[in-house]
Amino acid sequence: MFESKAGILWVGGIGFFVIAFLSNGWVPMLMYQDLKEQTAEEVVNSRVLYQFEEISRRYPQTFKQYYGDVNEDTCAEALRLGRQLYIGEGCWHCHSQFVRPVSNESLRWGEVAATIEFQNELQRPVMFGTRRVGPDLSREGGRRSNDWHAVHFFQPKMLSPGSPMPAYPWFFDGGPDQPNKRGIAIMTYVQWLGSWLESYPYYEELKDSDSES
Amino acid sequence: MTTANKTSTVLTSDDLDHLVDQELVKGYFLAGLTFLTISMIAGILVALQLVHWNPLDGIEVLSPGRWRMIHTNAIAYGFLANVFLGMLHWVVPRLTLRPVASRPLSLFIFVAWQLIVFLTAAAIVIGPSLQAMPWVADLAKRTGLCMSLGAQGLEWGETPFWIDPIALLGLALVAVNFMVPIARARAPLYVTLWYFMAAFVWTFLTYAMGNLLPEYAVGGTSAGAIGGLFIHDLVGLFVTPLGWGMMYYFVPIMLKKPIWSHGLSLVGFWGLAFFYPLNGIHHFLYTPIPMFLQYGAVIATVAVELVVTTVIINFLGTLRGQGQQVITNLPIRYFYTGMIFYFITCFQCALQVTLTFQKLIHFTDWVVGHAHLVMFGVFSLWLFGVMTYLFPRVLHRPWYSTRLCEYHYWLSAAGVLVMALDLTMAGIFQGYYWASLQSWDVSVDGSQPFWVTRVFAGLCMFAGLLCFLYNLWMTYRVPQEVYETGPALQGSPA
């Protein structure tokens, strides 16, 4: 078996792969099969709607042009597009979306991540992330105002001089006061993160008083 | 040729050369080097962004976020896959004494694979720009699909969803093309072919699992488990078996002696086959994935380290008595340097997957250093060794300059060593900055010296590549005396 073609093909190639898949992939799938996956419409809540409306009042012209009215459908549309941009622009390669139960992370970010938070359309594929150049974003919603985010996306160094984050001027029709369809979407998405938690918005207790930087 | 000598029919190296489509080997190598160049430029762009030296910040199609994905995907699918395919076209016919299933099919796969990699890159760069167009929303509504036109949200699997089926078809064709000669060869098979056979099956299954399941079948935490399996299996079941199979072929040929212990070869292969796929979840420790699965992955990872040790012992045993070849024979030096790096990465891996280490180093540059040590320090160095050995054979002329070959080696090996050490240290610092709850800026500012060092280490590796490309160009342009295949080749890149 150990040197035969059939052994290598069936036992090594397929057999061991299947064992690993069943034990490491299928088991969690079974464990969580009863948790219903929510759609983008279902995860729209009053807090993100409030932020969405705030955006509409702050940037009425571009908001009207790209989204029309504030309602759950347009908000879900913005969330979907926001998630697609979060993936397409590679945000998830520098920002994680899960808080670990170690290294004082729950003091810095808030509640430790739970399975239920990830059972929705906007976490397909799940945006755990593997690297933090910038901070974790899973509890970012509500911590900062929309105009802060607009300026920060336009040119991060204006607000965080030491930040290595790239600028995203293509999220705007000209200046930071005119976010376009993409800009409004990504801001809505970021404001949504963590909005389902009781601790929203979470402000960390840091040793350094300069926590807004 | 070990295998040729064992068969009753006497085969000359001419016969073997007829089995190999040398133009195709050359084509794959050149395509691979093209994508490696693109990938390294992308890497430098991102490295410059981190140290605030990126002069191109704010240009949409050059956004570092998008080019970061070009960097990793061009390495995995553009460089490693292409050069591996070239290597397979050289090795498989020689070991099986049979040509691949179909030469037109080989050519088709070559063209198709370049298109797949190029389209992936193009989609990653342009996709997000088109995402907000009204017609995309229309299309999404009509088809019920709501996916990113650009990258797919899976690390190493950013290949856009609409390319995945084509890539899977390509992988299936690759498997068929090489499995036919292997199936026709008389058993028992040589170690190299165990690894290759398994790799063809594993690569297809891994790609299908990772690119299809989290997108269409499962969401949330379970998708995280699948994603972990995918990240890991892509390295462990596609790159690793092809790499080790390659070592089991080229090392004995160049040292002109068999592998030290056949028993250890068996332990190495079956140990890898069993334990490697069980490691996936160790990429997501302390996530909401069930804890008992995390423990299982940690234990399997430590087991892999033990298996790897037996493989390294086997290759050191093979080298015994001919240690001077590491100095005099450049490809052998590439191979053994890669193996030492491999042992280091696997040792590092056995430590870093423990929950104790994870507290500190997860999410930090430690992991980035580890990834570079594996992908560049091991597999890229091995492929450089193979190309250094094979280019004179497919171009039918010696290298223009063996000194430039040496520069390539030293710049690449030293560059990646500095980068790995530098990022590993950066990771430890970052981990402590974060755990000590200082403001986030402190960790970013504290990383700057390491990131600056990384830029120069990367430029060093890139300079090595430029030496290699220049050397190749001059070898190609200045035809020297056409020389015979066979014994005369021993004089080539020393």
Image: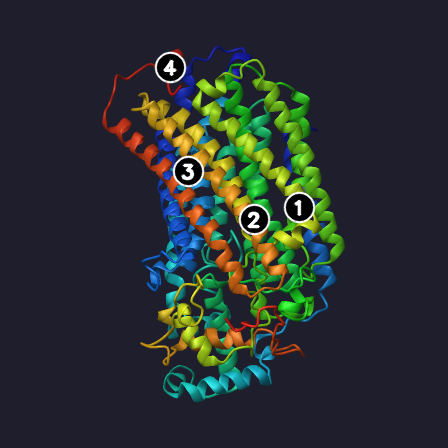
Q: Is residue B394 visible?
A: yes
- Asked if residue A131 is positioned above or below residue B341 in the image, the reply reads below
Q: Which residue is mark 1?
A: B279
Mark 3 or 1 closer to N-term?
Answer: 3
Mark 4 or 1 closer to N-term?
Answer: 1
Q: Which residue is mark 3?
A: B105
Q: Secondary structure at mark 1?
A: helix
Q: Secondary structure at mark 3?
A: helix
In whole angstroms, how far apart are the C-alphas of marks 4 and 2? Answer: 41 Å
Seen from the viewer's position, the closer of residues A78 and B202 is A78
Q: Residues within 10 Å of mark 2 (few under 14, many from 20)?
A: many
**Disc nearest the viewer among 2 and 3:** 2
In whole angstroms, how far apart are the C-alphas of marks 2 and 1? Answer: 19 Å
Label 1 resides on the chain identified as: B
Seen from the viewer's position, the closer of residues B217 and B360 is B360
Where residue B121 appears, as percent x and y from the top left, is 39, 53
Q: Looking at the image, which residue is at 62% across and 72% down?
A: A204
